[in-house]
Image: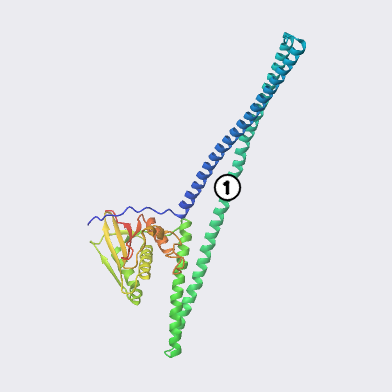
Amino acid sequence: MPTLEKPNVPETPTADETLRVEREKTNENLRVEREKTDLALSDTQEAVEEDADRIVRLARETADAVLETAREKADEQLAHSARFSVDDTISEERAIEDQALDLERATADETLDRERKEEARAIKKLLPLEREATDRTLLTERARSDDALANRDDFLGMVCHDLRDLLNGIMMSSALLCEKATESKEGERITKSGDQIQRYAARMNRLIGDLIDVASIDAGKLSFTTDLADSAGLVKEAVEVFQSAAKAKGLVLDAALAGDECEARFDHDRMLQVLANLITNAIKFTPTGGTVRVRREYEGDTARFCVSDTGAGIPADMLEAIFQRFWQVGKNDRRGLGLGLYISKCIVEAHGGKIWAESTPGRGSRFFFTVPLEQS
């Protein structure tokens, strides 16, 4: 069997992994912001203390200068009036005054330094308490968010199952009306309306099925059972199912099976669902006169499937985004919920395979996925 080159396709995280990554980013951002806050607070405190010290220093220098000037004037007046120099007694008194002033200033400096240290310790104790309260609030909000999501998914699952039961009843009633319709014109109108109801109901049933699958994926309960299966038969069945839809749009839908048949291990219904999603999209976005081809080939120890079309193609910057949930071709595109490719990706990866897309705008698109072969 030929070995084909497979592109390096990044795996898209699940909803739980995405939530975990987002929360890790939130925690990291919070940590970084707290570090910045600590640094800014420290810088601010240092700047305030430097400003205060400078103001005190300038005030003391000014006071010293005023005192020195006053003493010089006093000495000059005393010497002029008494006709003698300042005696030792005055010098000693001034020295005592200077010493007392220095002691008073040292005491003030010591008191200020002690107050600053106490304030810094108080802030250091207060910040962790506030941050601990913030962390507790964040954990509580996350727990509430998780509970709300779980309740939403459970509710969605129950509603979808109930809607599907009601929808099946509508489809059965419509089928009975069509069977009982006469061959008259009125009977033809009834049959035509019944067929429309069947088509609309089938589409609604697919949408409901997608919602159920998404709820199962989020809950980690996507059900599938792998077994040895016929990959060629899978391709032929998928092409046969959509042959009428392709012809109705004027498209050619065919299959190409390369290599001798090898046993692959997969859930037949789930892989048929993947092919159905890919073929449906290919038919939807391929203009009349185009071609949709389903190909199966072998690549090492995997079977590789490819659904190609001759549509408008997909821009390179969207080739990964199209596998995200609720992704739409455009804001006004209402041809689906945008879940088909997301569900297909989850199914393929649950089988241990990969799925990716290649496209050249104006020359169509190719969607690939792989499933493991049975090891002999």
Picture coordinates of residue 160, whole percent (x, y): 50, 66
Protein image colouring? rainbow
Picture quadrant where residue 39 is located: top right
**Amino acid marked by disc 1:** Leu
Q: Is residue 33 left or right of residue 324?
A: right
Image quadrant occupied by the N terminus: bottom left
Above or below 137: residue 374: below
**Placement of 106 over or under 347, stated as above or below:** above
Residue at mark 1 = 138
| Viewer-proximal residue among 374 and 328 | 328
* Nearest the eye: 58 or 26: 58
Residue at point 62% right, 29% down?
54
Name the side, left or right, on which 148 lies relative to 373: right
Give how far across and how far down residue 313 sits, in percent: 34, 64
**Apparent side of residue 296 relative to residue 285 in the rendered image (left or right):** left
Residue 124: x %, y % from top left: 61, 34
Image-quadrant location for residue 198? bottom left
Q: Is residue 345 above or below residue 189?
A: above
Please say whether residue 181 is visible from this viewpoint: no
- Give the secondary structure at mark 1: helix
Q: At which x and y percent is residue 168?
A: 47, 73
